[in-house]
Amino acid sequence: MNTNYIESKNFTKTNFTAEPLPKGEYENCIFSDCDLSNCDLSGCTFIGCSFSGCNVSLAKVSNSAFQEVRFTVCKLVGVHFENCNSFLLSIHFDHCTLNLSSFYKLTLRRSSFKNCALQEVDFTEVDLSGRSFDNCDLTGAIFENSNLEKTDFRTAYNYSIDPELNRMKKARFSIPGVAGLLGKYGIEID
C-alpha cells in the first residue's frame, strides 16, 4: 500500500535517477524537465499530473496507475505501459517520443496521441476505438488484433496496417495514407 500522498507539488529539473521518486500517490503534481529514465515507478499512482520536457525512457511502470496524466514534449522510449494498472487508465501524449514502447492489450479509449513519434510501438490487441493519431509517425508500429473502429488516421503517416487482422469499421484515413493499408499486397500506387 502507498504510504506517501503528495498533492499539488512542483518538481523542476529533478534528477530521479540519483535519488528515486518516493513510492506513493501523486495528485495534481507537475514534473518539469525531470530525469526519470530507468527509474522504478512501479506501484506509484499519478492522478491529474503533468510531465513536461521529462525523460521517462525505460522507466518501470509495473502496477503504476495513470489517471488523467499528460505528457508534453517528453521522451518515453521503451516504456512497457502494458504492465501498468489499467483501471481508469487515461494518458495523453503531445509532442512525445514513444519509440519502442508497448501498450499490449490495453484499452486506450480515454487516451490521446498528438504530434508523437510512435516508431515500432506495440499496439497488439489494443482498444483504440474512437481515438485519433494526430500528426503521428507510426513507422513500424504493430497493429494486430486491435480494435481500430472509428480511429482517425487521417493525419498519421508511415503506418502499415493489415485490415484483415484488425477491427476497422468506420476508421478514417486520408487518400495518401491508404497505401499503408495495402502494403502486404505488393501494390504500387502512383
Image (tube, rainbow, N blue to C red):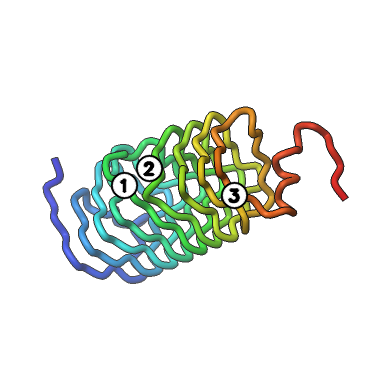
Above-or-below relation of 163 to 13: above
Looking at the image, tell me whether mark 2 or mark 3 is earlier in sequence order. Answer: 2
Amino acid type shown at disc 3: Arg
Q: Which residue is mark 2?
A: 60
The numbered mark at residue 172 is: 3
User: Image point 48% across, 31% down: which residue?
Assistant: 125
**Number of other residues with Cα within 10 Å of mark 2, as a class: few under 14, some 14 to 19, many 20 or more:** many
The numbered mark at residue 41 is: 1
Q: Which residue lies most toward the front here?
A: 170
Quick one: SS at disc 2? loop
The answer to which quarter of the image holds residue 86 is top left
Above-or-below relation of 86 to 74: above
User: Image point 61% across, 42% down: which residue?
Assistant: 141
- How far apart marks 2 and 3 lie (CA) works out to 34 Å
Quick one: SS at disc 3? loop
Give x and y (percent) for residue 117: 58, 55
Amino acid type shown at disc 1: Leu
User: Image point 79% across, 32% down: which residue?
Assistant: 185
In the image: residue 54, left or right of residue 88: right
Looking at the image, tell me whether mark 1 or mark 2 is earlier in sequence order. Answer: 1
Amino acid type shown at disc 2: Lys
